[in-house]
Image (tube, rainbow, N blue to C red):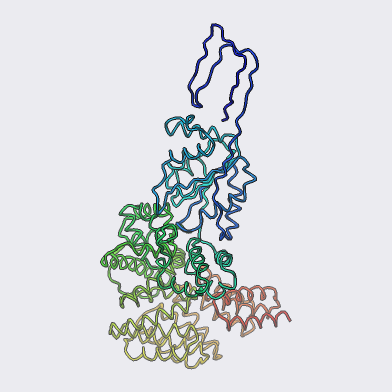
């Protein structure tokens, strides 16, 4: 709103008295009768230019800049992110690129919402500052926040201005600073979610994450030069975790000390973590910046945050967080949302929550008693172990469960195969981290229990190296427990893991050790595992000998599911040794047993055996049919590791039938799987097959 100045000349007021009327814009003279000329003078509008300089180290954020371009026209944009992530850098970089779009000026205020040196600014102080910047004389400013905010909105209405509200703490702090019309653009930066601003004013939320590696490298190179960052850039970037402030602090220190190689700054970060970025100047101290985010938390949220920081794995689900904190699920969900609003957690797909590494490092400084820490880790480990154990039995119902101690929490009951696979996929990194926690803390029994519970998932998804590492630790734990039965079991499982990776000598050494101390059921399992090792090594006669011994033991014990699995192995060996009739007899008997159990993976193996027999005898169409049935069963099981070999084998009867395009298609799919699973030798062989087919 502009106010005209009235100049009156030749005023005659016979019998009429002029009055001075006070109003929101100051004293106004009302003339009674005016003779002569009336001249209106519009005051020169003040054009504020309050934007601070943009950071010289700003880099990347191409997608975020484009999002601001799209969203900021006539709207409020709220940039939300953790302390030090680069919100202000982004807002100012974008604002300086938009000066021509907003010729009527730019307003900027640091609201000190999370300032290490000042208290949050009151909305009244910010409004008064904007009125001063817009050239309003002190005598014209009305009393009261509401009236001042109304005058501010009047003054910017219809003007094309850019308003940056930096470091906001709450919706109440921001609401009075928002213009009423759509001609101005407003950018707010905050660690708080400002849900009230987003819902009430229809603001656009731009959640800012860490810089990616390329952006972080560009930031360091801009400040230090590409030659200086060549040796240690990757490590510094990894240790800073994409935090713009952390990278900026490292770059600034390295710039001021050119004689010190960047590798030394990397070593400090590696040794001291977030404390390496402390400083006497609180505005240049990352711990000081982060501490402000924690300072405003309730005692409950502070404790939850500290416990989340010690949780194993890169992220956590609400169910696992409930176990960790011993809180009901609805309450922990509310706490997770509150910590996300404070930009201390990042919500990820599937309702999982992650903590930036530097924030996690700061959170570990929140005091926790050793009892609280130990109890929390026990509870969350129990959650992972008991849920994984139930999930493994869901994937492989023929396995005999192991005896676990009662859980100290409520695990998720996994009774559906698809749900079990989905849970294992989502939690795999956390399960491995929980395993390491158990090993480090000497929870020996729990170590091999969790290794056992990951067995089926690891084999079906091809996590063979992870499984080998688990059972190496599992064997060490079994040796410390001193229980012969557990030790035998660990040797057998480690032997199986070595077999899968082609380490046959090591596998047979562990399996022969397992033969020494076990009961009849253990002997049967071990002979079967030895048969698998010899079969994969290419010695079908040795494999048949051990498979036959295992079959006799399983039959005597009445374990029909394992009898069926072992009959299939005997059939495979006799088929490759040329006794097709005997092999077919074993396959039929095994199929009957599997369908009574049932065991889809066992049926799939039988179809592969029947396909081999058909292909060898020239029944290529029947071979294709059996391989396709096996493939359908394995796809339904989610067994991606065994799908590759079936596709590989399926291509051969396709070639024999002259169906080259179908052979090419299944071999390309198998090759993709082999490459993804790191099966280099299989991939090279299949590449040669494809080359021959093309020829």
- Horizontal placement of 137 versus 292: left or right? right
Quadrant in the picture for residue 30: top right
Q: Nearer the viewer, residue 214 or 452?
A: 214
Is there any visible trace of residue 392 in the rendered image? no
Pick the quarter of the image with the N terminus: top right
Q: Nearer the viewer, residue 471 or 585?
A: 471
- Horizontal placement of 336 versus 608: left or right? left
Is there any visible trace of residue 519 in the rendered image? yes
- Tell me: residue 334, above or below residue 510: above
Where in the figure is residue 132, as x and y percent of width and height? 50, 37
Where in the figure is residue 620, as x and y percent of width and height? 64, 79
Where in the figure is residue 33, as x and y percent of width and height? 59, 11
Q: Residue furthest front?
A: 10
- Horizontal placement of 666 versus 598: left or right? right
- Tell me: residue 120, above or below residue 677: above
Pick the quarter of the image with the C terminus: bottom right
- Horizontal placement of 120 versus 132: left or right? left
All told, the count of numbered labels is: 0
Residue under the image location 52 percent in, 33 percent down = 136
Where in the figure is residue 412, as x and y percent of width and height? 37, 62
């Amino acid at each position: 709103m502009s106010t005209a100045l009235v100049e009156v000349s030749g005023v005659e007021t016979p019998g009429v008295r002029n009055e001075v009327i006070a109003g929101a814009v100051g004293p106004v003279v009302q003339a009674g009768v005016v003779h002569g000329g009336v001249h209106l003078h519009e005051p020169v509008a003040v054009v504020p230019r309050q934007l601070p300089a943009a950071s010289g180290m700003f880099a990347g954020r191409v997608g975020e800049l484009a999002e601001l371009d799209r969203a900021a026209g006539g709207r409020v944009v709220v940039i939300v992110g953790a302390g030090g992530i680069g919100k202000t850098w982004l807002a100012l970089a974008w604002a300086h690129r938009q000066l021509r779009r907003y010729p009527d000026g730019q307003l900027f205020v640091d609201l000190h919402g999370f300032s290490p040196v000042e208290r949050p600014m009151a909305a009244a102080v910010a409004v008064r500052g904007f009125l001063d910047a817009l050239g309003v004389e002190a005598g014209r400013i009305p009393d009261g926040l509401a009236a001042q905010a109304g005058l501010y909105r009047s003054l910017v209405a219809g003007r094309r201005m850019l308003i940056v509200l930096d470091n906001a703490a709450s919706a109440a702090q921001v609401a009075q600073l928002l213009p009423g019309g759509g001609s101005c653009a407003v950018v707010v930066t905050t660690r708080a979610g400002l849900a009230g601003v987003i819902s009430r004013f229809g603001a656009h939320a731009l959640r800012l994450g860490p810089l990616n590696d390329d952006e972080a490298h560009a930031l360091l190179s801009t400040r230090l030069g590409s030659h200086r960052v060549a040796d240690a850039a990757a490590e510094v970037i990894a240790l800073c975790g994409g935090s713009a402030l952390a990278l900026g602090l490292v770059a600034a220190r390295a710039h001021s000390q050119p004689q010190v190689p960047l590798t030394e700054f990397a070593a400090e970060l590696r040794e001291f973590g977030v404390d390496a970025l402390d400083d006497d100047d609180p505005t240049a101290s990352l711990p000081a910046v982060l501490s402000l985010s924690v300072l405003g938390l309730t005692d409950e949220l502070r404790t939850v945050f500290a416990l989340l920081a010690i949780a194993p794995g890169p992220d956590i689900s609400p169910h696992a967080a409930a176990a960790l904190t011993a809180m009901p699920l609805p309450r922990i969900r509310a706490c997770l949302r509150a910590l996300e609003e404070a930009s201390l957690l990042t919500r990820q797909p599937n309702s999982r929550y992650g903590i930036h590494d530097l924030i996690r490092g700061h959170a570990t400084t929140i005091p926790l008693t050793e009892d609280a820490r130990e109890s929390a880790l026990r509870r969350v480990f129990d959650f992972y172990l008991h849920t994984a154990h139930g999930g493994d039995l869901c994937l492989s119902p023929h396995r005999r469960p192991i005896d676990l101690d009662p859980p100290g929490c409520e695990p998720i009951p996994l009774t559906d195969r698809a749900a079990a696979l989905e849970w294992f996929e989502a939690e795999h990194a956390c399960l491995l981290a929980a395993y390491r926690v158990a090993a480090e803390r000497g929870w020996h029994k729990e170590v091999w229990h969790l290794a056992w519970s990951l067995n089926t998932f690891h084999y079906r998804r091809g996590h063979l190296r992870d499984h080998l590492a688990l059972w190496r630790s599992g064997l060490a734990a079994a040796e410390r427990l001193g229980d012969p039965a557990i030790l035998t079991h660990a040797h057998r499982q480690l032997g199986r893991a070595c077999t899968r990776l082609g380490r046959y000598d090591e596998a047979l050494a562990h399996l022969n050790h397992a033969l020494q101390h076990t009961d009849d059921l253990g002997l049967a399992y071990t002979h079967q595992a030895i048969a698998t090792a010899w079969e994969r090594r290419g010695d079908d006669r040795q494999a048949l000998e051990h498979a036959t011994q295992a079959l006799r033991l399983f039959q005597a014990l009445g374990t029909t599911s394992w009898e069926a699995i072992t009959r299939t192995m005997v059939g495979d060996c006799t088929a490759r040794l040329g006794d097709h009739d005997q092999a077919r007899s074993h396959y039929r008997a095994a199929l009957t047993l599997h369908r009574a159990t049932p065991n889809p993976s066992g049926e799939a193996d039988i179809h592969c055996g029947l396909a081999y027999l058909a292909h060898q005898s020239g029944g290529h169409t029947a071979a294709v049919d059996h391989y396709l049935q096996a493939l359908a069963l394995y796809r339904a099981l989610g067994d991606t590791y065994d799908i590759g070999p079936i596709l590989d084998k399926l291509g051969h009867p396709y070639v024999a039938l002259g169906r080259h395009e179908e052979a090419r298609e299944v071999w390309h799919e198998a090759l993709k799987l082999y490459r993804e699973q790191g099966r280099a030798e299989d991939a090279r062989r299949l590449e040669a097959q494809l080359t021959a087919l093309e020829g």
